[in-house]
Amino acid sequence: MPERTGPDPITAQVISNVLLSIADEIGMSLRRASYSTNIKERADCSTALFDARGRLVAQAEHIPIHMGSMVGAVRRLIAPEYLEQLAPGDVYITNDPYSGGGTHLPDITMVAPVFLPSGPDGDDGEPRLIGFTANIAHHSDVGGHVPGSNSGDSTSIFMEGLRIPLVRFATGGEVISDVVAFVLLNSRLPEERRGDLLAQTSALRLGGARLVELCVKYGVETVEAACEDMLGYAATRLAVAVERIPDGRYHAQDFLDADDAELGPIPVAVTVTVDGSAIALDFAGTGREAVVAINVVRSALEATVYYALKAALDPGIPANGGFFDAVTITAPEGCLVNPREPAPVAARTDACQRVADVVFAALAQAVPEIPAGSHSSITYVNFSGVGDGFYVYPEVIAGGSGAGPELDGLDAVQVHVTNSSNLPIEALEAEYPLLAERYELVPDSGGAGRRRGGLAVRRDIRILSDSAEFSAHADRQSIGPHGSHGGDDGTPGHFTVVRTDGSRERLPGGRVSGIRLGEGDVMSIESPGAGGYGDPRDRDPALVLRDVVDGRVSPDAARDRYRVHLVEGPDGLGVDEDATVSARS
Amino acid sequence: MRIGVDVGGTFTDVTAIDHDGGFHIAKLPSTPQDQSLALRDGVGDVLSGTATPAGAVRYLGHGTTVATNTLLELDGSSAALIVTEGFRDLLEIARQKRPSLYDLAGRKPRILVPRALTFEVAERVGASGKVLRELSDDEVARVVEQVREAGVEAVAICLLHSYRDDRHERAIADALAMSVPQVYVSRSSEVAPEFREFERMSTTVINAFVGPRMHRYVTHLADRTADLGIPVAPRIIQSNGGLVSPDSVSRRPVTTLLSGPSAGVAGAAWVAGLAGHRDVITFDMGGTSTDVCLISGGKAVTTAERSIEGYVVRVPSASVHTVGAGGGSIAGTDDAGALQVGPRSAGARPGPAAYGHGGDRATVTDANIVLGRQNPREGLGSAMPIDAAAAQAVVAEVGHPLGFDVPEAATGIVRLANSHMARAVRAVSVEIGEDPRDYALVAYGGAGPLHAVEVAREVGITTVLVPPHPGTLCALGLLVSDVRATFVQSVLAPLSEEALTDVTGALERLDEQATDWFDREQVPEADRRTVFTLALRYGRQNFELDVDLPPGRLDAAVLPEVAEAFHATHERTYGFRHADAGIRVVNATVTASQRTDPPVPGTLPDGDGDPARALRETRPVVFGGRELPTPVYDRSRLMQGDRLDGPAVIEQMDSTVVLTPGSHAVVDTYGVLHVEVGTDA
């Protein structure tokens, strides 16, 4: 352990628990005071504390894509042109992926510098900058060409909504009404925006007051030293985990569905270099910028890499600057994961999922515990139309997660950078002129393997009003999630329209908009499954039997993929041991 | 005499109050194979110890973990599930979230009904309650036959929108009762008639899973208390803190799943009230975890839904936060060289090293023994020998890689555990926008009073209250809770004159349910109390707030008053109101209770303020890294008005109170210790 100069390590840990409490409190305050369901109930927001040098020390995040996505804004605030202007009572706002460190426009970041007032603890001079409080929240609308500001088919960021540069939202403790008016005029739901933005602001103030109290109680130097400890601890924990991986270069590549039929699928590639306790990820080999809104800006790439490393190496690594700064990430300019302004980014999460997939796949060459490929599609669908007034019903559909060496994949879950819940059937039918006809697992969608991939989900929605419009962004509709160590791939997803005359039409891909549906038409949504792990012929026949009895695997797949022969006996279905042994040999 | 018996994982606690207000307590090892054995013996001990005839028992309250353990140990009945066609996998898809954000090996909880035993029926009710597809007699007969062939002990029935129209569910339940009467039937429109299908289904399935065993237990329990000669039927506490008859529990055993913490919270609220405090945070520290709950204005914050090891239960309960830090929490260093305490626990077995049951990892209890805070020679009165040398050895092992000596390592373990618990205390208050410094901390559980003063100081709380018997407060809670049940009905209508009949219709149905329940519980007419509550929200929102309705009929004239009450609640909770937005009624609830007079506790004799009479010994205790000669008092010999200055230790049979330097305590009329935390470290 390095030489210590600060407080004893226990005091440092006690302080770090208080800092985490403060980050939690900012989040709770934000959720309590916010207007919109997205923040209040779905907790699509995160909060963080930074030290005076702009390093993230404590974060309360609910969604991995937010990990570190406030870092960019703070990094800019500590640059000289901003730093000199910072004053007590300031709150800064931004949502811009290219200049403000955001990942797409609906996520609005707010940051407040925190100053220790001159007084009992501080010196008599100027108030002293001791850190920053920050939060980020997903706003339900910031303008742009579609309601929700979250389209998959925009072709420029200028179509996606209002871009807010890093500017002051409050000064001297007062919200700047000109800025509020500017933002509100650009949203389809201005009153909701006002409430949510003020909730973000007041939560930051509360957090700032708590940070000042902490510094008064322990002294600024002690708190700073505790922050150093927290950063050092995260870096050590990452280093310990990386050292367990054999040195080497690990390469993996996967694909996103074509954004343009002529240009073909977009490769996403990574080379992970492990050298002792150092880890570097280079995304050379990744394809061009997409012409649709799936580009991944720097902060989204970082958040995804941090997620993948934490999950693959050690879930206990604290999400702070000590961890972030120890990871080297590079990507060629102009590629999908380092796009140039004004490339569109609204639906970046589908590509983030693929980035996580390739990082896992690369590390899997050295870490056998890493599972096979997961569904890794957001499968965001949106129905709108006129019922009891104009309505918009947005939904995300889960799928399978990849099988690991010891465990089957999970059926019907969200994976990687997102983890949002579904809308209950009874809620959707009460609110919209829609009827759910099926919501179920898809048999045989999980890749066969010694461990089976998780199953996909099917949700069928019937239109009850005269007409409706369907739009969506989903991926993995052409190439299924990969199997691992000899396991089969999972199935791709698809959208199918079943018209009242019984005709069926499979939509051409996952990124669609403006699909017209009439009364009685059914949209059948199926997400991707997930990859299996290990040779299917090594799967315990009893487990195959159980899956067949439960209807997760068909008898045909049991015979063809697992080479397990089943036979109806006096006690029900059983394994035909002899036939199975000979089929497997 | 009134008796409360609370069964915990390790001990069964009995608290009785006699007609003079005197308390009698007993603590026995629990009997997991049949929890009523320890109940029988504990009640027997108290009766014989006080020479009370069984016929003089006027009330027997019981807290049981049978349902909870059945779920946690996954040892329930084989069950089938009947669902609407097309929705076989609702239970498994749940809310589609993964169990752990970053753990790639995270598991979903084991499904309680296998997919093969989930049967679809052709039927459909729409969101408005309109039947879109009738359930045919043939279909009912077919599914009943499937259940019979499956040979299950229990069946859960949960059809879409059955909270609107329960006829299809009832038809199936009736047919099952006719054809397979031995099968336990759990029907969603009876168990949890609320909208949102997954939560309703999960609750209904868990009810089926624990139902048969709980039914057997309460039947057996009633026989056992009758055998003892106790003339009253036992009452069993539910998660909402209300007590009900064995019959009510048999119908909805799922309501008892979270009853343990609720009894403690009720006891803490009562003791705090005696001590003159209505705003408190409860701090219940046991062997494996610590539960904290906020009580505001004498009422515990409640929640409508909880998750137990990933199983979602839609049942009202005290909003208790649990943190994995308790006396048995294991301390050690992690890969990155930092000290960690918990969440792994040595539990009751092997337990702390000092208890000599084979524990070889340092626990929080071992650290307390090393520091001299917990008695280094004996525990539980004098019933249990303590191996202090073993505690020293395991704590030394933890300290070694950190370069800490034994007292430093023990201090570190206790401070870290306190820090985790402080985070939970902050969380329950800031979550609802309260400042914990405006609250007093009520310390109980075997280990709560050991840590409470330091935790309070860490959070900035100035007052700690220690009940007379902190180790048996849950049993006390059983004595002071009322006979009470809640019934919920989803409404989903605007709060408006036009839709008034939707609301009043639901209220009438609830009123009938309450009357049925009163009759079953044999509550005298004059003691029946009902309170109706509406769960309301603004139109676009997806979350509800409860508003109690004024007594009397709900008519158009009352609506503005209800609306204003909602706006005010919303403003108080969230800081703003939408005066012109429409309000929607999501659920209606009735709380039916029996008016009861709370017991009157006896008072302690006046002392002269000097606790010297209670001094047991002076032993060295480590505070802030320094060993201080510390007086150790016998709690049972303290008198009203005694003042104790920290550092001091107060020992009693079921717990140990630690007063840090700078704090002091005063004993009140009822024997509650009021600790002023002070600021001196």
Image (cartoon, rainbow, N blue to C red):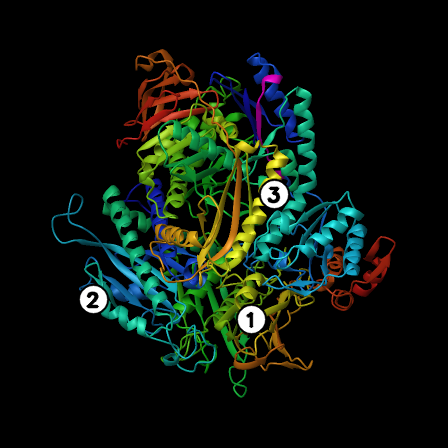
Residues packed near mark 2 inside 10 Å, few (<14), some (14 to 19) or many (20 plus): few
C-alpha separation, residue under disc 2 versus residue under disc 3: 61 Å
Whether residue A331 is in magenta: the answer is no
Question: Is tag 2's residue or tag 1's residue first in the polypeptide sequence?
Answer: 2
B18, A423: nearer the viewer: B18
Residue at x 11% of width, y 48% of height: A124
**Dot 1 amino acid type:** Pro
Can residue B220 be seen?
yes
Instruction: Specify the segment rendered in magenta.
Output: B55-69
Instruction: Answer whether residue A404 is visible to the viewer in this image.
Output: no
Q: Which mark is residue B254?
A: 3
- The residue singled out by tag 1 in the image is A433
Which numbered mark, 2 or 3, is in the foreground of this view?
Answer: 3
Residue at mark 3 to residue at mark 1: CA–CA distance? 35 Å
In the rendered image, which quarter contains the N terminus of chain B? Answer: top right
**Cβ–Cβ below 8 Å for labels 2 and 3?**
no
Residue B613, image x, y percentages: 36, 11
Please state the chain letter of the residue tagged with numbered disc 1 in the rendered image: A
- Residue B468: mark: none
Q: Quadrant of residue B198?
A: bottom right
